[in-house]
Amino acid sequence: MAAFSQKNLIFLISQPRAGSTLTQRILGSHREIYTVSEPWIMLHPLYALRRDGHQAEYSVQNSQKALHNFLNLHPEGKEAYFQAVRQMSLNLYEGLLRGSDKKYFLDKTPRYYYILPDLYRTFPDAKYILLIRNPLAVLCSIFNTFVQEDWWKIQYYQDDLLKAPGLLAQALLNFQGNSLVLRYENLLSNPEEEIQKVCSFLNVSFDAEVISYGNSSSGKWQFGDQSLIHLETKPSYQNLNRWQEDLQNPILWQSASHYLEFLGEDLLKCLGYSYTELKDMLDRLKPKSEVILPPALQELFCSASLFLDPSLQPFLGVVGATAQLYDTYLNFGRVLLEKDRVEQALKYIQIALQVAPSVAEAHYLMGEGFLRLGKLDQAVSAYQKAVQLSSENQRSQLDSAKLALQQALQLNPTHQALIDLLETLNTK
């Protein structure tokens, strides 16, 4: 077999719940294409170049700064890093491919939507399949599969819903030559024609037998769709509009209506869908009963507009364990305070405190926010808690708190709780 190179590499990119496992199973049944579960291997090395959006036990910010300093000294600059990541990853892909008699490796990892520009820079000669599904169908599938009626779980899929469509739309505009757009709806409606297009794009022969992916020997994977994909043997047209049945639930209908407004006409058009047609469909299917959205869903759609603010993009996502969402919410609250969006900031800081109530910085930020809103009693309470939890290395926060409280006292010289707290702080 010829040496493995970028030209032997295929990336399947989509939102989660967009039919990527189905597509992967079909293509993995081809005699020339090898694939395994979801590798996820490109996220860590490419996120090393980023200051925000991920966590580690060491300082991510210092690590990123040191890496950039190192690359500034390198004679090939940043390109040296992409070359090194490229070679490392190709070795890993080839290692799996070597045990098969196949020529191409397919990496299907939906969260690669986070890193599309850097992924393309790393592998400019690879093939990219951009799998697009109606975002309202994706929303219903996420609810039906992951959230069900545990509404608070929607926070774990916030980026999948609010970030991914825009990033995929950008890729549709920027990826040229090495990319193919595959629509989930077309795949279910006419699988032979669509897979034939894919095979032509990949320069592999078309074999109609791959459509019946269930006849291949692939076992059940750890990642990806764990439901109907393993119960059926080929794409089914009957599944095309099944998601619309979920809209009988008034909560899901309201969520879909809010999501449609968030997406808007321009983004939907870029993704290949009509805002007007989707709005008409929702109006047709509107349930007779109306309900108030659960608080977690209200928060999701109240926050949705923030995802359209480019200056907040670095603080709106997290790669890694969902248990580390505390840092994301605290960072988000801090940035919103800096932008004087105080009430929104307090919401996110409060979420951070629910996860980690013993972190002094969060209480300091709550105190600062309450002061700005003129809620002096609540500010004093937050600062008192912060002081109880403070350590010596938080001297700058303590000094900032003193200054803020002194300014508040000038406006409210008879507020005894402010006087008492300042006396306590001055002894620190």
Image: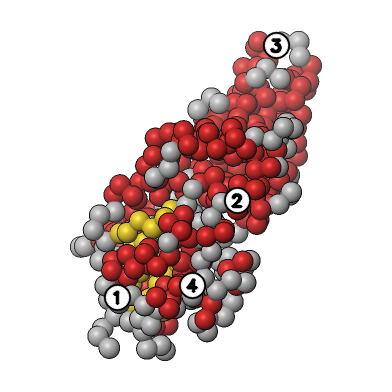
In the picture, the disc for residue 186 is none
Cβ–Cβ below 8 Å for labels 3 and 1?
no
Q: Secondary structure at mark 3?
A: loop
Residue drawn where x is 76% and y is 14% of the image? 415
What is the crowding at mark 1: few (fewer than 14 residues within 10 Å), some, or many (at least 20)? some
Q: Nearer the viewer, mark 3 or mark 1?
A: 1
Cβ–Cβ below 8 Å for labels 2 and 3?
no
Q: Out of 278 and 354, give the one closest to the viewer.
A: 278
C-alpha gap between disc 4 and disc 3: 68 Å
What is the crowding at mark 2: few (fewer than 14 residues within 10 Å), some, or many (at least 20)? some
Residue drawn where x is 66% and y is 53% of the image? 144
Identify the image quadrant of the C terminus.
top right
C-alpha gap between disc 4 and disc 2: 21 Å
Residue pointed to by mark 4: 25
Residue pointed to by mark 1: 204
Whichever of callouts 3 and 1 sits on the residue coming sooner in the sequence is 1
Residue drawn where x is 43% and y is 65% of the image? 191
Q: Secondary structure at mark 1?
A: loop
Residue pointed to by mark 3: 412
Residue pointed to by mark 2: 243
Q: Secondary structure at mark 2?
A: helix
Whichever of callouts 2 and 3 sits on the residue coming sooner in the sequence is 2
Q: Amino acid at mark 4?
A: Arg
Whichever of callouts 1 and 2 sits on the residue coming sooner in the sequence is 1
Residue 249, given in percent of the width and then of the height, sits at 70, 42
Q: Amino acid at mark 1?
A: Val
Q: Out of 403 and 301, give the one closest to the viewer.
A: 301
What is the crowding at mark 4: few (fewer than 14 residues within 10 Å), some, or many (at least 20)? many
C-alpha gap between disc 3 and disc 1: 77 Å
